[in-house]
Amino acid sequence: MNISSKVKQKIEALPEGAVITFDDFSELPNKRAVALCLSRLKKEGELERLEKGKYYIPKKTKFGTLGPSESSIIQGLLKGDEGSYISGVTAYNKLGLTTQVANEITIVGSKYNRKAIVGKIKVKYIKGKAPVNKQNILLLQILDAVNDVKKIPDTTVSSAIMILKRKIQSLSLYEKQEMIKLSQFYRPYVRAIVGEIFEEEGIKEVEELRSSMNPLTFFKFNISKEILPLQKKWNLI
């Protein structure tokens, strides 16, 4: 069976609306042949192009052809970049920080900063700050939320920090230690907020964060002392 037949066979086994990328054919040796085959199927109307290197199987109805669902598009956008994850308002909504629904999907990954429209979805690509793997995505989403805490819609800084503090406290000791390492890739005020929470927890590795910061730099957040009682020790005012 030639490559073209193998590509078609695999596509025929997928449901309508499925998003397809080159990664779906990683077992085939000739990537150029795969690309040409997908391009040909697009010309024949068997596939529609989502964005460069990504296609979908159109769903044919009596009202015309339909594209993939938003969730399928998002999954497709994450394909091909193992170091990518959803951040921004979409992630903050799932973390319980805001009730607002995002009008733009933010994807953090290895790609350069840019904006695009994929299907009917606005996408904002941001180059990641820290190393990403499947196990630390939640930690990075929390750190992103701390980083953006003044910009999260439909909430206050104190309310958002209170929710984030609870989520951080619920992490395992290993996850907390990993978060301390990941915090080093973020701005000093992120390290200060995370450091304060971990000092309350009595985690000794917190000194790694303290030593990485300028003791003469202060961060104005006006967070309630009931939420961060040790904030002065971390120059949070």
Image (cartoon, helix red, strand yellow):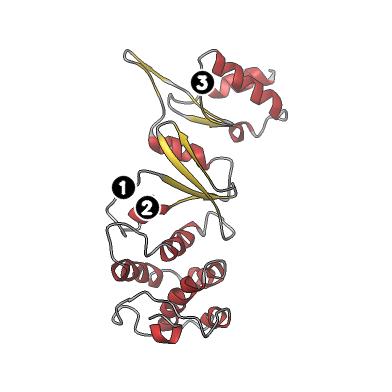
Which residue is rendered at x = 56% and y = 56% of the image?
A: 132
Q: Residues within 10 Å of mark 1 (few under 14, many from 20)?
A: some
Q: CB of mark 3 within 8 Å of CB of mark 1?
A: no
Of the pair 113 and 48, the residue shown nearer to us: 113
Rendered image quadrant of residue 1: top right
Q: Which residue is mark 3?
A: 47
Q: Give x and y (percent) for residue 200.
A: 40, 83
Q: Amino acid at mark 2?
A: Val
Q: CA distance from mark 2 to mark 3?
A: 31 Å
Q: Amino acid at mark 1?
A: Val
Looking at the rendered structure, the secondary structure element under dot 2 is helix
As displayed, is residue 163 above or below residue 93? below
Q: Give x and y (percent) for residue 172.
A: 45, 70
As displayed, is residue 170 above or below residue 71? below
Which residue is rendered at x = 61% and y = 32% of the image?
A: 22
Q: Residues within 10 Å of mark 3 (few under 14, many from 20)?
A: many
Of badges 2 and 3, the one in the foreground is: 2
Q: Give x and y (percent) for residue 167.
A: 37, 67
Q: Which residue is mark 1?
A: 101
Q: CA distance from mark 3 to mark 1?
A: 30 Å
Q: CB of mark 1 within 8 Å of CB of mark 2?
A: yes
Dot 1 or dot 2, earlier in sequence: 2
Q: Which residue is mark 2?
A: 89
